[in-house]
C-alpha cells in the first residue's frame, strides 16, 4: 500500500489558510500525500477533487462561521456521490455548541486552535485501526463514533 | 458504482469502467498503477498513448498557472484533457505536499479535464516511477491530449523527454544573463520555449537572450514566445506553436536513451531487495559493489 492521500480543503469564502497549511505540512511530515485545494472552493468542487485524486481522507477548514452549512453540505454530497468511505475531519473556529450537529452530519473529528499536531496523527491512527477492524468510520456509515 | 476505498472491483473491471469514462475507476486505477500493480500496468501499456506535452521549467516560473490555462483552452475546443501534476516527495518522511491545484482554478474541476496530483515517491530523480503507464491509462480512459507538469527543474533534469511526445519549456523574466541561455541542457531539447509573466519588465530581454542562445545550434527553429498566463496574453500563439511542433531526429535519439535508462531505473528501484540492500549499505554491512552485485547480477 502507498501513503494515505489526504485532501485539505478550504470551503466557502473564508480566506484564512494558515491553519490549513500547518495541518497540511504536519501530515506531509508524517509521510502522507496531501493535496491542498487552495482558497474558496465550493462543496461541489471539493467532491470532484476528492474523487479525481482518489483520496481517502478529507480535512475541511473554516474560520468564518459558515461551518454549520458547509461541513454538512460536503458530507451530504460525498454520500450522494457514493463516496461513503471518505473520512471527514474539520478544523478552525468551531464553537463547542456547534460540534454535536457536525458530528452527527458525518464529521469524525474537529480540531480547534492550539491543537498539537500529534493530536490529528493519533486520530489518523485510530481511523486506520477502525478500517482494519471493519468498524464504521467513513462518512456514509455512522455509528456515532467521533474523536474525543 | 465504484466506491473509493471499495476494493470489491478487481483490476479487469476497473479497466473496463475506466475505459467507459468512469472518473472514479480511472482515479483508482492510477492509484494501483502508482503502487506498482503489474496486472494494471501491463493492461494499460497495451493501449497506444495520445498526444502528450511535458511542461517543464525552473521553480516559480508559472508552470501550474500556464498548465491550467492550456488545459482550459484545449477543453473549450471540445477535447478531453488529462493533466498529471508532479510534485516532489520528501526524501526523509516520504510525504508530499501537492499544491498545484491551488493554481488550477479553471481546469481543476472542469468536466472535460481530469487532474491528478502525482508525488515522485521513491523514484530516483524528478520523474515518478510508472509515469508512462499513468499516461497510457489516461489515454485508455478517452483523453485526447495529456499534459504533464513536472517538478521545478534545473538545467540537467531532462527525464521528461522520455515520457512525453513534446516539451514546452517555461521560463520567466529576470532569470540571469545571456550565458544562462548558452549553457547546454534542457533548453536544447525543448520543442517550444515560453517566457511566462510577460506582463513583467525584462521578459523581452529574456526571450531575446534565449533566442540568441538557440540561434547558433540545431534548435534554431524552436519558437520562443512571450506569454502571460495570468493576463491570458500570447496564449493563442502558444497553442498554435504546440500544434505545429516538428520532431527533430537528434532529439529522438536522446528520448530513446532516456526511455531506456529510466525503464532500467524503474526496474531497479522496484526490485524487492532494493530497500533491504539500502539498509545494509547504511549499516555498513556491504559495499556499493556488493550491493550492485546483489540487485543487478543476482
Image (cartoon, coloured by chain):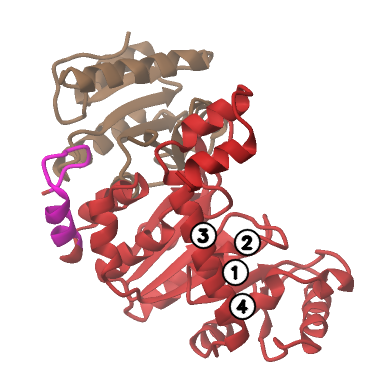
Label 2: state its secondary structure: loop
Q: Quadrant of residue B170?
A: bottom right
Label 1 vs label 4: CA separation? 7 Å
| Secondary element at tag 4 | loop
Q: Is label 1 on the same chain as label 3?
A: yes
- Give the side of residue A147 with respect to residue B229, left or right: left
**Point 45% across, 37% down: residue:** A34
Q: Position of residue B53 (x, y in %)?
A: 49, 73
Residue depicted at x 19% and y 37%: A76
Q: Are marks 2 and 1 in contact (CB under 8 Å)?
A: yes
Which image quadrant for residue A55?
Answer: top left
Residue A68 position, x and y percent, is 31, 28
What residue do we see at 39% from left, 38% from top?
Answer: B272
Q: Earlier in the sequence, mark 4 or mark 3?
A: 4
The residue that label 4 is drawn on is B233
Mark 2 — on which chain does it sit?
A: B
Which disc, if any, is residue B62?
Answer: 2
| Residue B287 located left or right of residue B116 | right
Q: Earlier in the sequence, mark 2 or mark 1?
A: 2
Rendering colour (chain B): red
Secondary structure at numbered mark 3: helix
User: Is A76 rendered above or below residue B147?
Assistant: above
Residue A105 in sight here: yes
Of badges 4 and 2, the one in the foreground is 2
Question: What is the distance, in whole Å, between disc 2 and disc 1 at their CAs?
Answer: 8 Å
Quick check: B53 above or below A146? below
Reading the image, the residue beneath label 1 is: B229
Are labels 4 and 2 assigned to the same chain? yes
Disc 3 and disc 2: Cα gap in Å? 27 Å
Number of the front mark, 1 or 3 = 3
Amino acid at each position: 500500500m502507498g501513503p494515505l492521500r489526504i485532501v485539505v480543503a478550504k470551503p466557502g469564502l473564508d480566506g484564512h489558510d494558515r491553519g490549513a497549511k500547518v495541518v497540511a505540512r504536519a501530515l506531509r511530515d508524517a509521510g502522507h500525500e496531501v493535496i491542498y485545494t487552495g482558497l474558496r472552493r465550493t462543496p461541489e468542487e471539493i467532491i470532484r477533487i476528492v474523487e479525481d485524486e482518489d483520496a481517502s481522507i478529507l480535512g475541511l477548514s473554516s474560520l468564518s462561521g459558515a461551518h454549520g452549512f458547509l461541513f454538512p453540505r460536503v458530507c451530504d454530497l460525498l454520500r450522494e456521490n457514493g463516496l461513503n468511505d471518505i473520512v471527514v475531519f474539520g478544523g478552525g473556529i468551531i464553537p463547542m455548541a456547534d460540534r454535536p450537529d457536525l458530528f452527527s452530519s458525518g464529521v469524525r473529528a474537529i480540531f480547534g486552535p492550539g491543537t498539537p499536531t500529534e493530536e490529528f496523527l493519533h486520530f489518523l491512527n485510530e481511523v486506520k485501526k477502525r478500517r482494519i477492524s471493519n468498524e464504521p468510520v467513513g462518512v456514509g456509515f455512522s455509528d456515532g463514533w467521533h474523536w474525543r | 458504482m465504484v466506491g473509493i476505498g471499495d476494493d470489491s472491483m478487481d483490476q479487469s473491471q476497473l479497466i473496463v469502467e475506466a475505459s467507459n469514462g468512469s472518473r472514479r475507476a480511472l482515479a483508482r486505477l492510477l492509484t494501483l498503477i502508482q503502487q506498482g500493480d503489474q496486472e494494471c500496468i501491463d493492461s494499460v501499456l497495451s493501449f497506444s498513448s495520445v498526444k502528450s506535452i511535458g511542461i517543464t521549467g525552473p521553480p516559480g516560473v508559472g508552470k501550474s498557472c500556464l498548465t491550467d490555462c492550456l488545459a482550459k483552452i484545449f477543453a473549450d475546443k471540445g477535447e478531453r484533457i488529462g493533466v498529471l501534476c508532479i510534485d516532489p516527495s520528501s526524501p526523509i518522511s516520504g510525504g508530499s505536499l501537492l499544491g498545484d491545484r491551488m493554481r488550477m482554478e479553471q481546469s481543476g474541476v472542469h468536466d472535460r479535464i481530469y487532474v491528478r496530483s502525482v508525488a515522485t515517491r521513491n523514484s530516483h530523480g524528478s520523474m515518478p516511477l510508472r509515469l508512462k503507464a499513468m499516461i497510457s491509462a489516461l489515454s485508455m480512459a478517452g483523453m485526447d491530449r495529456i499534459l504533464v507538469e513536472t517538478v521545478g527543474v534545473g538545467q540537467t533534469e531532462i527525464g521528461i523527454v522520455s515520457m512525453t511526445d513534446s516539451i514546452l519549456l517555461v521560463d520567466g523574466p529576470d532569470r540571469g544573463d545571456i550565458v544562462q541561455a548558452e549553457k547546454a541542457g534542457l533548453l536544447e531539447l525543448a520543442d517550444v520555449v515560453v517566457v511566462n509573466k510577460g506582463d513583467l519588465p525584462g521578459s523581452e530581454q529574456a526571450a531575446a537572450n534565449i533566442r540568441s542562445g538557440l540561434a547558433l545550434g540545431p534548435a534554431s527553429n524552436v519558437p520562443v514566445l512571450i506569454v502571460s498566463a495570468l493576463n491570458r496574453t500570447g496564449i493563442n500563439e502558444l497553442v498554435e506553436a504546440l500544434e505545429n511542433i516538428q520532431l527533430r531526429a537528434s532529439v529522438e535519439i536522446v528520448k530513446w536513451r532516456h526511455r531506456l535508462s529510466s525503464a532500467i531505473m524503474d526496474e531497479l528501484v522496484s526490485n524487492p531487495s532494493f530497500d533491504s540492500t539500502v539498509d545494509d549499505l547504511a549499516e555498513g554491512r556491504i559495499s556499493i559493489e556488493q550491493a550492485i552485485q546483489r540487485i543487478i547480477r543476482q
